[in-house]
Amino acid sequence: MTLTGTLEAAEAAAPVESLDVVARMLKEHLGAESVTFLILDFTGSSVVRLGAAGSVHTGTPARRITVRGTLYDDVIRTQRPSVEEKGEGALVRIVAPVTNRGDAIGLLELFLPTAPDAAVMREIGETAHALAYIVIANRSYTDVYQWGRRTAPLSLAAEIQHRLLPTSLACEAAQFAVAGALEPADQVGGDTFDYVIDRDTVQLSVTDAMGHDVEAALLATLLVGALRRARRAGAGLAEQAREADQAMHDHSHKGYVTGQLLRISLLDGTTEFINAGHPWPLRMRNGQVQEITPEVDTPFGFPTPHTYRVQSLDLRPGDRLVMLTDGMVEHRAKGIELSELIVRTRDLHPREAARTLIAAVLAANNGHLHDDATVMCLDWHGTSHSQRDAATGANLTNASKRSRPEHASEW
């Protein structure tokens, strides 16, 4: 069984049935007793087991398995397959990460009659990586994967908000790793984040539309659409900001949106930055966290005449940059010290660090937020890095062996 063969066989099947094709191939080739795919939810706190074709019904609540403190948690965090043997005669359990470019999609779990050797483990790892491609290729054709990633039905505003986010919430390249996390308020605000990688640059944005519910979601839709349109037309950062502001003036007269735009050259590390009335970002360097305080320009759509200044941002190899919305900052008074939390999560992958920051804010507010909480975490490795270790779809050089605390507040 080869990686190419797995992909070709799965592509020939219907979108949902492709999971069954992979399971059948593993059973036939390795003698596996059972094979299942567990999809990770948006928060990274639970998984849903997707069984045989026809067994998943999007109209029924997902049967969730909490990952904290389990073998699933270890595999997701370390991005390394795990083997569990329970004694002579018992089936051997293998759990492998299903990941693509650092985006933890889920887990492949199978039971074998005997302990696998190195060659079998390599096949399982390659198949799990292939499964990540299969999910990515098929999720635009079916709602099954969306169903599995949701811990609860979304409101209309939350549905709009989720569709504005990048398809993959995390991404790794040789020069950087980036991940975002968003926790909607009880009455959804207008938070969004976005990123894109071009041949020579990576661009990031974090935005926050005023208001709540559908009205805020529509403002966010207008703003994100304008930014993407300008960016995809090849506009520079200043022009992107100008066109987004103009779109707000032309099509909405009910509010404004704050935001930050960031553009980093993958050739020399030069960094451009625009702040449109948004909370300042935090940068961790050598274990110390500092608030970056660039000049602040007017939010997008503000009625007074204004321009947007492109400023430079000092970013060096080894830095971690945290961009956030005011839903994160406002909760400092409730016992969350973000700077300390960023230091304590410095050994975690940006994906895990972002989720931990969000979880801490949510826990401090007893699970009920008055404003959306959003964070983007960027690790800058520098332009001297030319490749990454991606044997399982994740950068294994960044995989932390550190265990999570039992409660987010322990960070």
Image: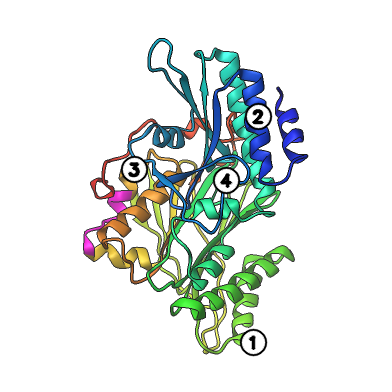
Q: Dot 3 lies on which element?
A: loop
Name the residue tied to disc 1.
250
User: Which residue does the image show at 40% across and 37% down from the upper left?
Assistant: 73
Q: Is residue 341 above or below residue 219?
A: above
Callouts 1 and 2 close, C-beta under 8 Å: no
Name the residue tied to disc 3.
287
Q: Dot 2 lies on which element?
A: helix
Query: Which label sits in the foreground, 1 or 2?
Result: 2
Measured in 3D between alpha carbons, the distance from the residue under mark 3 to the one under mark 2, in whole angstroms, is: 48 Å
User: Which residue does the image show at 59% across and 73% down from the upper left?
Assistant: 221
Image location of residue 190, percent across then percent down: 48, 72
The reply to whether residue 399 is in sight is yes
Mark 1 nearby-residue class (10 Å; few <14, some 14–19, many ≥20): few
Q: Is residue 74 above or below residue 312?
A: above
Name the N-terminal-most of marks 1 and 4: 4
Image location of residue 278, percent across then percent down: 44, 70
User: Which residue does the image show at 55% across and 89% down from the upper left?
Assistant: 253
Image location of residue 369, percent across then percent down: 33, 67
Measured in 3D between alpha carbons, the distance from the residue under mark 4 to the one under mark 2, in whole angstroms, is: 16 Å
Image location of residue 38, percent across then percent down: 51, 40
User: Which kind of residue does numbered mark 2 sit on?
Assistant: Arg
Name the residue tied to disc 4.
55
Query: Which label sits in the foreground, 1 or 3?
Result: 1
